Image: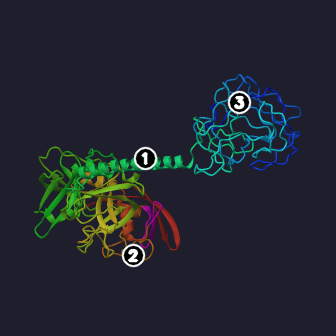
Amino acid sequence: MVPAQGVPAQPVAPAQGTPAPTYGTFAPADTSAHGTPAPAEDSSYEIPAPVAGSAYESSAASAGSAYEIPAAAASTAHEMPAPVPDTAYGTPTPAPGAVYGTPTPAPGAVYGTPAAAGDAPYETQAPLLGAAYGTSASEAGAGAPDPSGGASHGASAPVAVSGAGTGVPAGTPVPGASLPPGAPPAPYASTSRPAPDPWRNYDPWATPGPLQQNGAAAGTGTRRQGRTRRSLVLGAVLIAVVAGGVGGAVGVHLERDGELGDIVLHQAAEEAPGRPADSVAGIAARALPGVVTLHVRGADEAGTGTGFVLDTRGHILTNNHVVEPAGARGEITVTFSGGESAKATVVGHDSGYDLAVVEVSRVVGLRPLPLGNSDSVQVGDPVVAIGAPFDLANTVTSGIISAKERPITAGGEKGDGSDVSYVDALQTDASINPGNSGGPLLDSRARVIGINSAIRSADGAIDPQAGQAGSIGLGFAIPVNQARRVAEELINTGRATHPVIGVTLDLGYTGDGARVGTRTSGGSPVTPGGPGARAGIRAGDVITEVDGLRVHSGEELIVRTRAHRPGDRLLLTLRRDGTREKITLVLGSADGD
């Protein structure tokens, strides 16, 4: 431990165990500068003397003492001066006339550095025993024995002071002045303001200040403010560096992408052309090579329609109303999806089914479309329609099956009923427009399930061409099962057969059901020996159901009948004279046009 600077050492150390006076009896102050009486020697509060042989050791306490301070032995390297009886604990006795709190330097020493007593090194002064803490010793009671062999109890230590003519008030300690020979050094007297030295006399009730390694008080506010300023400066520098880096990166990005120069528009990279097979694109990719556009020119009129390849021999299926304008001497040109064109001739046609087959010759690489099964189609199934609406070839649209077995009739422009077609159609919301007629309606596996034939226009009419009207989401297609049978007959025989019941219907009947005529100009409304006559149908009967499906008109009965083949067996429900009857009928056959 390094002794505090400016604290003089006592010349003689007391023997270990020197009794300390008791605390509690005060002697009147006589000439004390401070004026605070010292306690009597019978005080109950005692301070021990230091142990000889160590700088700071625990000594034996005096009799009755509660708190003891060790005394240093005379031969130790660090000696503690003997306490003066009845002096204030930790407070040295000021010399007469000296200013309180100003230490007196040792003879010949620089001010504030006391000389060590005897041969002992520079030591820290031991506190004076017996006095009240922070007060000077009373001069009363002088003559008491001094444990150190020096002045009697209560005697003030001599201090070198200023005199007359020095310019300093009398009694003020003079730096560099010498003490009288043999006088003990003046102890360090406390002042009303605490000394800044942390190694001052011990005060058990004082709040200890922070210490640094060198013994000086630790800095607080000033150093913290310095560290705060340095932290702020470093933070500002860091922010500036980061902001500069970000700004540079943004500048490079803007310069590279042309934000500061020419505008460069970004787009997605090129993707592989392949698409899932069941997607619209996948279906179209497989079906388009087998779809053709037909340009028909006749003597009086011309038209455009669509068809698709049936086989590698060059047969193409389309609607009858598409090729009808060509007549007997007209011209039909077929254009494939790749742009190749070829002349075509009519193989056969049937206005009742609104179907026709044409043929191209000496064309290789034909891609026939596979045929599906229209009986397996369900409402809501996705479909794709391909055609040439308004001569826009290879147009692809998509939708769903909106309904099945939708009875429709189309045509009838001639007025004699010979051009009326009866179709038990598939209804779709896929866009179908004039020019789509004859084109394929495909399922999700690119198979033909229907032949697009008619649309309902905004005025309520159903027309295969629909004038110049457009789609309103009501398109109709001939089921492929019926179209396949008719196409086979047209290719093989040139004519199609129609299934018949063998009765004449009253198309003017407005009631519910299909009524058999009551009379005809040519004879009986029930053909004698025909299918109807053999089944027991009579004139005036009203047919209300076919195979359990309701029939509401004569046209609807024809549609239901033509959805079958000749020879098919039907179960009919009819109303006769207010009663309901069921009969079984086998369809007959009749040649088409």
Please name the amino acid that badge 1 sits on. Answer: Leu
- Taking the magenta stretch, the answer to whether it contains residue 537 is yes
Q: Are marks 2 and 3 in contact (CB under 8 Å)?
A: no
Query: Which quadrant of the figure contains the C terminus?
Result: bottom left
Relative to 570, 191 lies left or right: right
Q: Relative to residue 170, is residue 109 depicted above or below?
A: above
Q: Are marks 2 and 1 in contact (CB under 8 Å)?
A: no
Please name the amino acid that badge 2 sits on. Answer: Thr
Residue that carries the numbered disc 1 in the rendered image: 234
Residue that carries the numbered disc 3 in the rendered image: 11
Mark 3, secondary structure of its residue: loop
In percent of width and height, residue 84 lies at 78, 36
In percent of width and height, residue 505 lies at 37, 71
Q: Is residue 493 visible?
A: no
In percent of width and height, residue 490 lies at 23, 54
Residue that carries the numbered disc 2 in the rendered image: 518
- Which contiguous range is marked in magenta? 535-550
Mark 2, secondary structure of its residue: loop
Q: Point out the tag, 2 or 3, that comes first from the N-terminus.
A: 3
Q: Locate residue 519: give its quadrant.
A: bottom left
Please name the amino acid that badge 3 sits on. Answer: Pro
Residue sitting nearer the eye, 19 or 452: 19
Residue sitting nearer the eye, 220 or 51: 51
Extreme residue toward the front, this view: 165
Query: Which quadrant of the figure contains the N terminus?
Result: top right
Q: Point out the tag, 1 or 3, that comes first from the N-terminus.
A: 3
Q: Give me the C-alpha separation between circle 2 and circle 1.
A: 112 Å
